[in-house]
Image: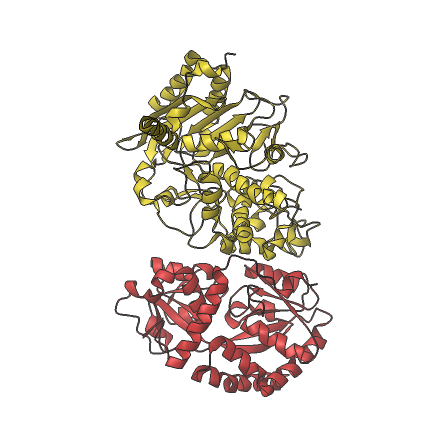
Chain colours: A red, B yellow
Amino acid sequence: MKYVTSLKGLSRWIGISGLVMIVSASLSATGPRITAAMFSETKNEIVTVENAPLFSMQRPDGGLAFEIVSAALKTQNETVTLTTYPVQKMVDYYLTQEKVLGVMGRDPTLSNEDKRGNKVLPVCLVHEHYYYYKPLHPKGIVWKGALSDLKGMRYGAREEENTAAYQKAGVKIVRVSALERFKKLKEGEIDFIKEPELSANMMLESNFKADKHQFGMIEPAPEESTALIIFNLKNSDAKAVLKKFREGMNTILENGQYQAIIEKYEGKNPLSQSHLKNFKKLWKNELAKK
Amino acid sequence: MKRFAVIFMIGFVSLCAEGWEEKQVAPESVGLSTQRLENIDNIIDRHIEEKKMAGAVVLVARHGKIAYFKATGKADEGKPMERDTIMRVMSMSKPITSVATMILYEQGKLLLSDPVSKYIPEFKNQKVLVPQPKGSPYPYKLVPVQREVTVRDLLAHTSGIMYLSYAGLYPNQPGRKDMLNLYKEAQINDGYCRSDEEIGDMVKRLGRLPLTAQPGELWEYGLNSDVLGYLIEVVSGMKFDRFVYENVFKPLKMDDSYFIIPKEKVRRLAAVYKSDWKGSLERVGEHEMLLSNELAMCPYDAYETSGKYLSGGGGVLTTAYDYFRFSQMLLNKGELDGVRLLSRKTVELMTATNHSGQYYADYLHDKGWKFGLGFAIQQDREHNVDAGDVGVFEWAGLYSTRFSVDPKEEKITIFLSQTTPFGHHFDLWDKLEVLSASAISD
C-alpha cells in the first residue's frame, strides 16, 4: 500500500512530476489551445472521449495514445485528426451513424458493440492503479492482488465498465462518471476506483491540488489495460488506413519512435523501459490473429 | 489658508466616503410622491406579515437620486433585513457579465460578430441535435451548424445552448430528453451550485456537445453567460472575477459586490427561505441543496470564501445599493459619477430590441418583451402589460430578485428578497412596478 507519490523509483518520480508540471501548466492557462484537429477537415477522423493525457484535444499532439497512432501513420504518409467529446454516447454515435474512420479508447471503456464487425488493434499499454481516500481508510486498503481481498467494498466503476469479475468477488458496484470519481472517493460514496496513473496524476493536480496527498495508491498495481483503436470497417478508407497503420506501427516499434513517445509521457524509468518489450509481445499476438 | 485646507480635506473625505445616504433625496424633488411611494410599504409589509417572504429590500430611484429605500422583515433568524444586506442576485449577474463583455468589445478586443470558436476552440465544428421520427434506427441526428455561434448569440441567448432546468420545461419536445442526458453525462450543470472546477473546464465540455437549435434560430435562455465568463478570461487574460472587479465593481464603487465574499462580510449575507406563498415559510438549511426537477441550487455556496467555479450567469452577491449604481450607469448610458464604463452607442446597442429576431423573451412577463444583450426590453404595449414603458429593460434572479430601468422616466426599481421557488413573486413584482410608476407626480 503506498502513497500517490511513493513510486517505484526516484527516476520515475522525477519523470512523472515533470510531466505533471507540464500538464498542469497547460491546464491552468486561460488562453485557447489551437490544435490542427480543431480547424481541419474531418477526413480520417478518429473520435474518442477526452481523457488527458492519453487522448486529448487539449494537447497539440493529441495525447500519448493518439500521438502513437499519428506517428505510425505518418511513416506511411497518412494523416489522421482527433476529435474528442465529453461523453461516450457521442463517440458511439459517430462510430455507428457517421462512419468516422475510427474510435479510440481504453479497453474497459469500449463496448462490445463498438468492437463488433470492426478491426480492433492495441496502441499502447496503460498503467492503472487502484486509488482510495486515506482519511476515510486510515489503515489503508489491504489488497494482495485478488479481487476477493476487496470483498464488501464499494468500487466506483465507469458507466460502461464490465464489472462481472468484481461482482463475482463480492465487491459492491457504484456507477460513477469519469469526472466525479475522485470527488466521490473524497465524499465517501465509494471506497476505491481504478484509474490510469497518468490521468490520475493530472486530475489530482488540477482539481485536488490542496489535498492530493490524501489520495492513496493501492499496491500492487492491477493488470495494465490497453489503449485501443477501432477501425470502422463501414468507412470506405478504413481498410487502406488500417494496412498503413500496421506497417507504421511495425516501423515505429523498431526505429525508437514508439519508445520516445512513451518516455515523453512516462519518463525514463524501469516501467517505461519494459513497456516496449511487453507491448511488442501483445502486438505480435494481435498480428498473428488475422 | 490652514482653515481652507481643513475645509477642503473634510470635503474631500466626505466625497470619498459617499454612500447611499448622499444619493437619497425627498421623493418630491425628483417628481415622485412620498404618499404614493408609501403604498410600497403596505404591500411589502403585508407579504411579510402573511409569511410569503421573510424580508425584502426595495429601492426606487429617479433622475439619479434614491427616493425610496427600505428594508423590511428579516434577513435570517434573529437578524433583521438591512438596506446593506448582501443577497444572491443569481441571473441578475447576467447583465453584469454582459457589461464586462461589452467593455472588451469597446477595447477592440472582440467583435460581437466573432465566432466563439475564435477564442474557445471547442466551439468549432459544432453540431445541432435534430430528433428523428419515431421508429428511426437512431433517435437523433447531429447536423453541422449552418453558421457558428457568435459572441452576440451568447449575449442574446440565441446560441442554442440550453439550461438543464429549462429543458425540463419541455418534457415532450422531441430531442429535449436526449439533450438533457448528454448534458448530464458530460457533468454540465446550470452553474447555480459552485462546482470544484474552473469555468473553462465545464465550458470546454459544453462546446463539444450539440446545440438544441441552429444558432440564431431560437431564443432559449441558457448557460450563455457562463460561456461569456470564460470567454472574458481568454480574451482579457484575467480571472473572470478579477476582471469584473477591476472593470465594473471597482470603478462603479460597488463595494459590496462579489463572486466570492470576503470573510468579514459573510455575516451580512441573507439566508434563503422556502415559501409556498401561502404562509409556510422555512429557512433553507445550512447545507441544503434545493432540487426541483432538473434545477439544482446551493444557497450555501454564497458563504464560501473560496471556490473555483465563477458563474457569469448566476454567481454575483451584491446589495440593492450596489445594483442601483450598476443600473444607474446603464440608465446614464454608460457613465456614473464621472466614470464612464461604456459609450452611449454601446448601451443603445445592448438595449436594442432586434437581437433575438422574431422571438420574444417572455419568461418574465408576456409577449411584447425582447431580449437585448443581457436583459429583456419592453418592445410594445400591445401585449399583456401592467406597467413600464416601451424601452424599459429589466431582468430577475432565481431567489426572487428583480430590477427594472425606465429610460424615459429615468427611473430605477429594485426588489431583492431571498425567496424560493422563483415563480411566486411575479404578481408582487408587477404590482411594485405599478406602484413605482404611479408614484410619478410630475
Q: Position of residue B434 (x, y in %)?
A: 50, 18
Left or right, A146 with respect to B233, comes to left
Q: Is residue A5 visible?
A: yes
Q: Report the residue at 40% width, 68% height from top.
A: A167
Q: Report the residue at 58% width, 65% height from top.
A: A48
Q: Report the residue at 52% width, 79% height from top.
A: A262
Which image quarter is the N terminus of chain B in? top left
Q: Position of residue A33 (x, y in %)?
A: 57, 61
Q: Report the residue at 50% width, 75% height from top.
A: A265
The answer to which of A145 and B1 lies nearer the viewer is B1
The answer to which of A203 and A181 lies nearer the viewer is A203
Q: Is residue A163 visible?
A: no
Left or right, B2 with respect to A58, comes to left
Position of residue B349 relative to residue B25, above or below, is below
Q: Tell me how many marks there are.
A: 0
Position of residue B334 relative to residue B205, above or below, is above
Q: Position of residue A80 (x, y in %)?
A: 66, 70
The answer to which of A37 and B168 lies nearer the viewer is A37
Position of residue A37 relative to residue B161, above or below, is below
